[in-house]
Image (tube, rainbow, N blue to C red):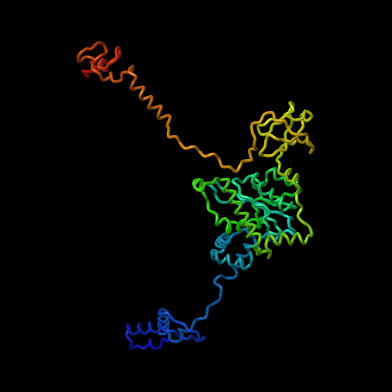
Amino acid sequence: MICPVLDTGLSTKARGRLVREIAAREHTDPFGTSVRYSRDTLDRWIRRYRAGGFAELIPSTRAACPRTDSATLELAAALKRENPARTAAQVARILRASAGWAPSESTLLRLFHRLELIGPAAGDTPEVFGRFEAEHPNDRWTGDALHGPRIGGRKTYLFAFLDDHSRLATGYRFGFSEDTVRLGVALEPALASRGVPASVYVDNGSAFVDAWLLRACAKLGIRLVHSTPHRPQGRGKIERFFRTVREQFLVEVTDTTTEELAAAGTDHRTALLALNGLLTAWIETEYHRRVHTETGQSPLDRWDTGWSRLGRTPAMPTAPDLTEAFLWSEYRTVTKTATVSLHGNTFQVDAALVGRKVELVFCPFDMETVEVRYHDKSHGKALPHNITRHVHPKARAETPEPPIPPATGIDYLTLTAQTHHQQVRADRRIGYHALFGDSHGGESHGEGEGNGEVAGQLSITDIPDVTGQSGASA
């Protein structure tokens, strides 16, 4: 290929033109493949041939001998085995201190990886999280909360419960707060429509560790399980469901401001109801009927198939049991006057309960109606004595806070300063201008008149100077 270029009679310009022509053509290599060679490659071949002939064009065999002696590598491995906590940099320091030379840290790292002195095989066996799935429907529900869009400038939260076996969304609802009330609003319809699960698996959020949820689960015979803090591995299914909600539902929902709601002629509560309606439609028509990639069935079909295999239907709670489960309760000791206090409200109870610790059962949205129980036996309704609160402090409604009234623009302190300034200008009892008046010149109009001075007030001209002269002469 380079023989035409080796002619000694060619000029530099002609040789360069010929090399460019060779580089522009396609050539067939020894293996029959069409290839192109660059100008730099051809020039390198020409220089090598002129320097040593054809022998210089033969590729030299690569020497595979290691650059680091085996004794040094064995010593480095021994130092690592002696103390596995030593890093490659620390081993290099020890080698330099003992032998005066050490391989690079990258060389030591490759050595340690090859000998499995670092990595998963070097220390304790890593914890393996196996795949888990409940055997039957309603064996286990997983609950969690998702931060949702803003409606009228207010942030929303989605409480959801997922059946571990079928991946069916049993309960779900958006709310304006991440509290116990909004959790109950999502859980109660789930229990009424899908039955009572054997266990509920939740995290350690404030809404899930509330005493109300523990009481509700105890009343319905549900085992409440909290995950270990900072270990979210057991809630993978609900997190994957939330990912689907974000990617397929929330991506179509836009945040709104209060001005946009006012322009649309709606309010926060109506917009929240509309959002929950859209979520229900999406879950029932899309999510529940689409084949799940893990189970190979749609959540609704897997739910029905699971109950058909068991030969029974879900255990549905009765209306009284469901109502009882969603009541709140607190314990109080009855005073000597046969009264109990509950969040600022005072109630009169049976005198036979004086000194005893009773359970007060109530609805969080009706603090006037309280039932008294002692040892799980009802002692009737407590008689309201002094009612100052009608709703539990945690039972905040979905209605937005009242808007801040517009500013009036009146600055009280500025008005006070202006009034004071006007009073000073109108008050002539203090004649500040008399300090600059002439008490000896001009026509006399009586004492203190004609010169702007107040009678009996000292003029600046009457003040003696330190030199003994009058102020005017000074």
User: At x 60% / y 43%, what residue is drawn?
Assistant: 398
Figure check: 212 above or below 114: above
Tell me if residue 121 can be seen: no
Can residue 366 be seen in the rendering of this structure?
yes
Q: Position of residue 233 (x, y in %)?
A: 66, 56
Q: Nearer the viewer, residue 467 or 102?
A: 467
How many numbered discs, if any?
0
Q: Within the image, what quadrant is residue 428 found in?
A: top left
The image quarter in which residue 437 lies: top left
46 left or right of 309 in image: left
Figure check: 367 above or below 416: below
Placement of the N terminus among the 4 image quadrants: bottom left
The image shows residue 378 at horizontal and vertical percentages of 78, 36
In the rendered image of this protein, does residue 154 appear above or below residue 405? below
Please identify the residue farthest to the top as the structure is shown. 446
Residue at the left extreme of this rendering: 442
The image shows residue 210 at horizontal and vertical percentages of 68, 44
- Residue 303's x, y, as percent? 72, 59
Closer-to-camera residue (396/198): 396
- Quadrant of the frame with the C terminus: top left
Picture residue at 41% right of the left edge, 27% below the top? 416
Figure check: 61 above or below 161: below
